[in-house]
Amino acid sequence: MTDSPVFLSESESAALVDDDLALAAAREAFLATADGSTFPVVIGHSSLPHTRFTLKSGSAGDLVGVKIGSFWPDNTALPRHSSTIVLLDPATGRLRAVVEAAAANAYRTAAADALAVATLARPDARTLTVIGTGHQALHEVRAVSRVRPIDRVLVVGRRADAARAFAAQVTAVTGLPADPADARTGVTAADVLVTATTAREPLFDAAWVRPGTHISAMGADGPGKQELPTEIHGSAKLFCDLPDQSRAIGEFQHAPGAVPVALGAVLTGASEGRTSPEDTTVFDSSGFALQDLTLAAALLHRAALAGDTE
């Protein structure tokens, strides 16, 4: 790499990313929480209040930088979501690289939830229920099914037609049998439950969750967002990416007394994860900057190996 900043466009990073790269980068990021630094999330908008962008920054080793995620709901010719990662030179603070990574961000988010499943779910987990039928939900199904022997997928959606269409898409993409289900049926049957929505209130009743279920929740990443019933906090083992952030903008903002364990601490052996097949485990993923920095570094490394960058 020369002294000139490197730029990876959206099309380039989308062509480079895959599930293996995203999962390895996620593991590196969660391990880095032991000695890396993250800083408070900044949430803003343009002159149009219904637009939204977030800045998540951090540093770990030789990685220093920020991820800017934006949501412009009025976009029609362009995607509504975008993600840009800026890496700085740790010695000088000068610009090192800019990586557009909207498509890669979907892999990154799913990889974190899959890492939690690989770490916390029962090894024999076979039924995956996903609540949500959007773009991210398909990434979640694909990533989770790579780390557990999933042989059945149930899809819960707000609309029956969307759930049927998404179930057909899951089967077409993954080869797994997938069927639509109502919320109670899906939650009750789940060995692994993934929530991938923009909900602002609980999606299901805590009493429907069977002992031994693992839940990965990724939708709560801002004030007021919520996917899980607060009653689950008293009966489950609670985990998250960053405890302070999770209590500020993640799922545990609705349970100020909760004491979630950082997933990175489980990966390093500093804290316990699942200790019994009957444990119910919950992982709240609000997303943090080290995930984006390790993802950008992995994409740049793969691009350099391919001869795409100098």
Image: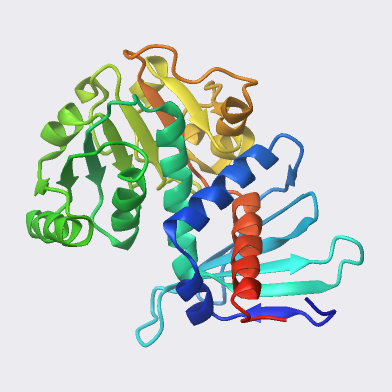
Determine whether 69 is above or below 265 in the image: below
On screen, residue 158 versus residue 280, left or right, reads left
Toward the right, the furthest residue is 92
Q: Is residue 189 above or below residue 295?
A: above
Q: Quadrant of residue 260?
A: top right
Q: Image point 79% across, 66% down: which residue?
A: 88
Image coloring type: rainbow
Asked if residue 153 lies left or right of residue 87, the reply is left
Does the rendering let one see residue 202? no
Q: Residue at x 41, y 74 (%)?
A: 80
Q: Nearer the viewer, residue 293 or 68?
A: 293
Q: Identify the image quadrant of the C terminus.
A: bottom right
Locate the N terminus by quadrant: bottom right
Which percent across, then down, holds residue 296? Answer: 62, 64
For the point 27% across and 24% down, the residue is 206
- Which quarter of the figure has residue 294? bottom right
Q: How many marks?
A: 0
Is the residue 199 above or below the residue 1 in the image? above
Drawn side of residue 123 relative to residue 128, left or right:
right
Q: Residue at x 52, y 73 (%)?
A: 13
Residue 193, quarter of picture? top left
Taking depth in this image into account, of 11 and 287 the one nearest to the observer is 11
In the rendered structure, the answer to whether residue 256 lies left or right of residue 206 reads: right
x and y percent of residue 127 in the render? 20, 34
Question: For this rendering, which residue is in front, 220 or 38?
Answer: 38
Residue 175: tell me if it is visible.
yes
- Residue 245 location (% of width, % of height): 60, 40
- Where's residue 85, x and y in %? 63, 67
